Image (tube, rainbow, N blue to C red):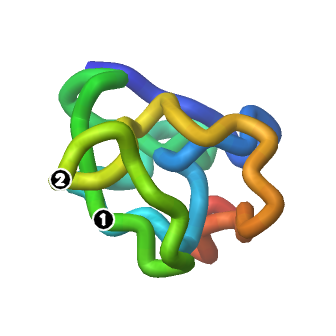
Amino acid sequence: MWSASKNEKCCLSCANWGGKRCVAIGKRAETDSPSTRGKCYAGVPGDATQGPTAMGQRGCSKYSVWSALI
């Protein structure tokens, strides 16, 4: 498993990312792998048709904290 906090500002912790994830202990977003892909609902293109990876898009201007982590 791989996780990220809202402070890391990557796709996994972003409200706009549609990949498979859950909330882990300590209000961290968790997924199977940092390479898990999901559609970006803010329209940010990924490097593959399945969308950006969970660890991708750090520092993205369209980043918004996933409400489950607040």
How crowded pointer 1 is (Cα within 10 Å; few <14, some 14-19, many 20+) is rated as: some
Q: Which residue is mark 2?
A: 50
State the residue at coordinates (45%, 58%): 45
| Residue type marked 1 | Lys
Quadrant in the picture for the C terminus: bottom right
The tag earlier along the polypeptide, 2 or 1, is: 1
Relative to residue 32, is residue 21 depicted above or below? Answer: below
Helix, strand or loop at label 1? It is: loop
Q: As drawn, is 4 to the left or to the right of 41?
A: right
State the residue at coordinates (72%, 62%): 63
Helix, strand or loop at label 2? It is: loop
Relative to residue 23, is residue 16 depicted above or below? Answer: below
Query: Would you identify the image quadrant in which residue 14 lies?
Result: bottom right
Between 68 and 57, the one nearer to me in the picture:
57
| Residue type marked 2 | Gln
Between 18 and 62, the one nearer to me in the picture:
62
State the residue at coordinates (24%, 42%): 48
How crowded pointer 2 is (Cα within 10 Å; few <14, some 14-19, many 20+) is rated as: some
State the residue at coordinates (49%, 38%): 25
Relative to residue 65, is residue 48 depicted above or below? Answer: above
- Distance between the alpha carbons at the discs numbered 2 and 1: 6 Å
Give coordinates of residue 20: x percent, y percent. 21, 54
Callouts 2 and 1 close, C-beta under 8 Å = yes
Q: As drawn, is 2 to the left or to the right of 8?
A: left
Give coordinates of residue 15: x percent, y percent. 56, 71
Quadrant in the picture for the N terminus: top left
Q: Which residue is mark 1?
A: 39
Between 65 and 37, the one nearer to me in the picture:
37
